[in-house]
Amino acid sequence: MPKIILVGVDGSDSSRRAAETAASLAASTGATLHVMMAADDRDRPAEGQYVGDVRLQSPAEATATEIAESLTGIVPNVQAGPAHGKPADALVQVATDIGADLIVVGNRRVQGIGRLLGSVATDVAQHAPCDVYIVKTV
């Protein structure tokens, strides 16, 4: 049984469906769910930057947080945040860093020409330090 599940999101409907599946898996196994969105360093606000009393978030952090908050009705223990780098690389690195037992990704773009050129799901499956669950979302 997984204890730590990591799901990658990008704000799309496909990634939201993958996150819902990850939340259901986490709820059924008692696992902690980590919701992560990859971003490049240009999207990152300066550390500790505030407007009034509100800490600024990068778009990636804001998206991951919003999706994580939408899942709290399914699974109580959800954490969210951004990771920097290309999506597949970031997912693999975060999974390694947090000791994830399972990575959940959607199958967006795993069809047609994308299958020949690669996709996030394919790259994660090839390099993950743990099991990978690819959710059929399209």
Image (spheres, rainbow, N blue to C red):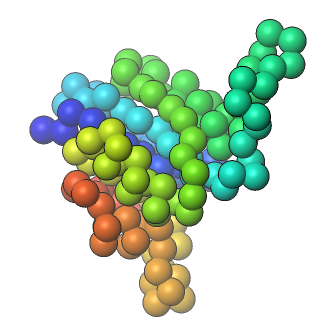
Q: In the displayed structure, would residue 38 be above or below residue 119?
A: above
Percent of width and height locating residue 75: 37, 24
Q: Residue at x 53, y 73 (%)?
A: 109
Q: Give the quadrant of residue 2.
A: top left
Q: Residue at x 30, y 61 (%)?
A: 128
Q: In the displayed structure, would residue 5 be above or below residue 103?
A: above
The answer to whether residue 70 is visible is no
Q: From the viewer's perspective, tell me whether residue 87 is left or right of residue 43.
A: left
The quadrant of the picture occupied by the N terminus is: top left
Q: Residue furthest left?
A: 1
Q: Residue at x 44, y 20 (%)?
A: 73
- Judge by depth and name the residue closer to the eye, 71 or 90: 90
Percent of width and height locating residue 87: 53, 60
The answer to whether residue 95 is visible is yes
Percent of width and height locating residue 23: 37, 35
Percent of width and height locating residue 138: 49, 64
Q: Residue at x 46, y 62 (%)?
A: 89
Q: In the displayed structure, would residue 29 be above or below residue 38?
A: above
Q: Residue furthest top?
A: 53
Q: From the viewer's perspective, tell me whether residue 77 is left or right of residue 68.
A: left
